[in-house]
Amino acid sequence: MKPLTRSQILGLDSSHLIKIEDQHLLLDEVADAYQRMQTAAKSEGHDLRLVSSYRSFERQCLIWNKKWQGLLPLNTLEGTTVDAKLLSDHDKLHAILLWSALPGASRHHWGTDIDVFDKQKVEFSGQKFELVTGEYETDGPCSALAHWLEGNIQDFGFSFPYACYTGGVAREPWHLSYRAIADQIEKQYSLSALREQLIEAQIEGIDTVLPELDSIYQRYTLNKGIITG
């Protein structure tokens, strides 16, 4: 595959992506692999659908800024809500990163990563779908799909980038990454390009973000965080 440009990696350009399921954008190769996986899942009784795919820098920036301003809730690892006003800027930074990526450093910018659910079982449950781990465990509406994914996604080139909590992003059993291309993007990723873009965009909390930029990328985007304490 032709290497992505700086703008494409940072979520500033989606012209290279194709549309599937009406509103979702993915790289052509990723879309093909997803649709083959979807067909296989359907044959075993799972209505595999997309919750999220490509997300632009602008969209991620909107989410980030609202969370920094306290206009969207911040949650702990256990799912309880935290008042942003009671946190230091450092603690607020990491509270946001637990569940939401830094603009420009989100894997959803790449066209390789997807969030999935079992649409039919969620609708049958009659409960509000919130994309939380409990919905993919025990008797949750997506638990059977989650079990199927664990045993089958590698056959279609996908993996779980956030399979477990390592001190960075919370566990996301719904998040799949198309490894062959995602690995290429990781190798060409430029932190200096990210820094320049964040400065240009002037995101909320930038003075707190920039000194920790390298560790943020390693700990959260690549999920190489280390649990301490």
Image: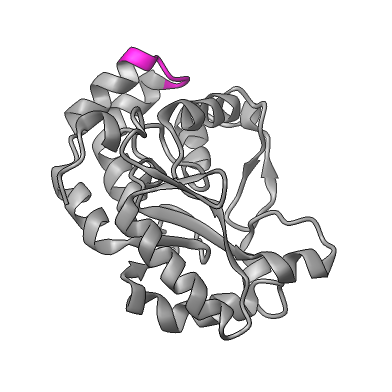
Q: Is residue 6 left or right of residue 125?
A: left
Asked if 149 appears above or below 55 in the picture, the reply is below
Q: What's the residue at 40%, 45% (across, down)?
A: 18
Q: Nearer the viewer, residue 171 or 46?
A: 46
Q: Is residue 131 left or right of residue 214?
A: right
Image position, residue 198 (x, y; %): 33, 21
Where is residue 57, by image quadrant?
top left
Q: Nearer the viewer, residue 206 or 103?
A: 103
Q: What's the residue at 55%, 61% (across, down)?
A: 116
Q: What's the residue at 38%, 16% (across, down)?
A: 201
154 falls in the magenta region: no
Image position, residue 220 (x, y; %): 36, 48
User: How many discs appear?
Assistant: 0
Residue 122 visible in the shown view = yes
Image position, residue 143 (x, y; %): 63, 76
The quarter in which the C terminus is drawn is: bottom left
Image position, residue 70 (x, y; %): 64, 27
Majority SS type along the magenta span: loop
Asked if 66 appears above or below 162 in the picture, the reply is above
Where is residue 176, by image quadrant?
bottom left
Residue 162 visible in the shown view = no
Magenta extent: 200-205
